[in-house]
Amino acid sequence: MDASKNNSEEVLIDKFNRVVDYVRISVTDRCDFRCVYCMDEEMHFVPRAQLLTLEEISRIAQAFTELGVKKIRITGGEPLIRRNVLKLFEDIGQLSGLDELVLTTNGSQLTKLAQPLKDAGVKRINISLDSLDAEKFKRITRVGDLNNVLAGIDTALATGFEKIKLNAVILKNRNHDEVIELVSYAGERGMDISFIEEMPLGVIANHDRAEAYYSSDEIKSDLEQAFELIPTTETTNGPSKYYKVKNTGTRVGFISPHSHNFCDDCNRVRLTCEGRLLLCLGQEHSVDLRKTLRAYPEDNEKLKQAIRDSMAIKPKGHEFDLTGKPLIFRHMNVTGG
């Protein structure tokens, strides 16, 4: 892929005057876990023939950087289980104009891939960790091995990435009693942690989202029983609102799609693994970039124009509702974590 220097100063701006400079790219909807808040136990995955090829994803990533995008996050499903995915990291890591190539993972593959990922140009990793109790972890993930994930975290820490952050989805009566322990675990290892309110994407059998909902305010109140949290304006260019733990410097973030909507300054779009450019996490506004790619395999300007045009349909924000049927029927693994 041509990673020649891009001298363009173009930026993407939506109709609400928000600059879009951050793209989350899902490379697969498949995962080696089956987390209860992310997917149904029996999932139907996108047929492999409908997935974007790694070369097509690289081409889209290049188009976005030429349109002013500075940060690309690779997500899934579990991105590290896709065959030959390291080549994609290597290609994107060489793009001129890109400030940050980052990754979200469940940690299951990091004992093998941490060093190759760093060598490819990955600067920061977010690792999902919802429990430090092996039995609870297995119930939440349905199939996950906590010891394997903890070993992956240790390997990543030893590899020397610029930053490693934990993400924890907190569910009432499942893991809400672990938030203090999770902050302590992160702090002892020099990591930050973000707590995420569950997002109502897709119908999941035997899981009542309204009953499991545990708000950021409740989590913060629990943490204040053990820590002094100091507000900070620091940001990682994402939706987390951060606090610092006094005397440790650990940052605790809250991603609060229900209790504290973060849409007003949204700077993100998402590319699904089959090539839909989602303009909002919680709305169905999208553009089919796969169609453009395959109709014009040699014309990057057509691709870039499709991305520019998509800014006109980026909505003001999401409309999540925990009490009724989900407005969005795609699961989180399809959306991209």
Image: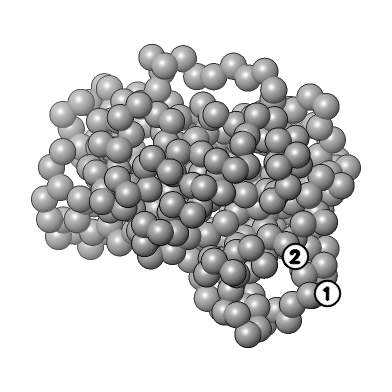
Q: How many marks?
A: 2
Residue type highlighted by circle 1 = Gln
Residue receiving disc 1: 225
- SS for tag 1? loop
Kindly indicate whether the residue at mark 2 contacts the one at mark 1 (C-beta within 8 angstroms).
yes
Residue 263 drawn above or below residue 280: below
Task: Please tell me the numbered disc located at residue 36.
Answer: none
Q: Residue at (81%, 39%) from the top-left corner? A: 209
Q: In the image, what residue occupies the spot 75% across and 65% down?
A: 180
**Amino acid at pointer 2:** Ile
Pick the quarter of the image with the C terminus. top right
Q: Residue 166 location, x and y as percent?
A: 57, 56
Image-based side of 179 in relation to 241, left or right: right
- The residue at which mark 2 appears reads as 180
Closer-to-camera residue (209/328): 209
Specify whether 127 is left or right of 135. left
* Percent position of residue 73, x then y: 41, 49
Asked whether residue 322 appears in the rendered view, the answer is: no
Q: Please state the horizontal and vertical placement of residue 12, each as a whole percent of the image.
A: 36, 55
Q: Answer whether residue 199 is visible to the viewer in this image.
A: yes
Residue depicted at 52% across the width and 69% down the height: 190
Whole-number angstrom distance, CA of label 1 to CA of label 2? 9 Å
Q: Residues within 10 Å of mark 1 (few under 14, many from 20)?
A: few
Q: How is the image coloured?
A: one colour
At a point 41% along the width and 16% down the height, the residue shown is 48
Q: Callout 2: helix, strand or loop?
A: helix
Tell me the quarter of the picture where residue 297 sits: top left
Task: Mark 1 or mark 2: name the one nearer the start of the chain.
Answer: 2
Q: Is residue 122 above or below residue 190?
A: above
In the picture shown, does residue 225 fall above or below 256?
A: below
Where residue 230 sits, quadrant-wise, is bottom right
Quarter of the N terminus within the rendering:
top left
